[in-house]
Image: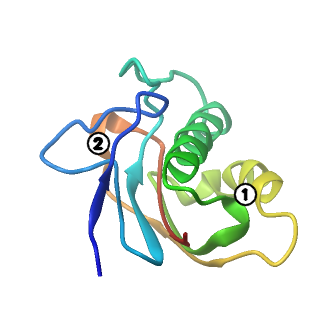
Amino acid sequence: MTRTIVSTDQAAPAIGPYSQAVMTDTMVYCSGQIPLTPAGVMIDGDVTAQTIQVFENIKALLAASGSSFEKVVKVTVFLADMGDFAAMNAVYSQHFTSNPPARSTVQVARLPRDAKVEIEITALR
């Protein structure tokens, strides 16, 4: 089984010693995405605006890996405030309209760069 590092300038750059994503022969593992633009600029605004940017990053990583939202099998959502769940979920549901993946959502004490949301995914290739 091969292990390939995925890197694209169409998604937020890694802000530490990790890869944007790693793919094997059959799977794609995307690092947690926060609302950074591909230029590394943090999106200001509410959780809706931040979640939109997070999904743009995920879409770019999936494309660079030869995958898509239809092949996502597991999502983990980290929220700074569980009170933002409904707003995050409204954006989330636009990307998984049928046969949604398994998901966990947790509230955390703090996220990198004080983001309101971070999302990581695992997908088939």
Question: Compared with residue 1, is residue 72 higher up or lower down, i.e. above or below?
Answer: above
Q: Which residue shows up at 16% across the image and 41% down it?
A: 16
Near-viewer residue (64 or 38): 64
> Which residue corresponds to mark 2?
112
Q: Position of residue 34 (x, y in %)?
A: 43, 42
Q: From what the image shows, is residue 39 above or below residue 70?
A: above
Q: Is residue 121 above or below residue 40?
A: below
**Of the pair 5 and 36, the residue shown nearer to us:** 5
N-terminal of the pair, mark 2 or mark 1, is 1
- The quadrant where residue 71 appears: bottom right
Q: Position of residue 2 (x, y in %)?
A: 28, 73
Q: Left or right of 95: which side holds 74?
A: left
| Residue at position x 65%, y 37% in the image | 52
Q: Does the residue at mark 2 contact the one at mark 1 (Cβ under 8 Å)?
A: no
Dividing the picture into quarters, in which one does residue 85 lie? bottom right
Local SS, label 2: helix
Label placed on residue 2: none
Farthest residue to the left: give it.
17
Q: Residue at x 47, y 24 (%)?
A: 37
Location of residue 80 in the rendering, given as x and y in whole percent from the top left corner = 44, 51
Specify the amino acid type for callout 1: Asn
Question: Could you tell me which quadrant the N terminus lies in?
Answer: bottom left
**Residue of label 1:** 89
Q: Nearer the viewer, residue 27 or 91?
A: 27
The amino acid type of the residue labelled 2 equals Pro
Q: Position of residue 62 (x, y in %)?
A: 55, 53
Give the residue displayed 29% in from the left and 42% down from the top.
112
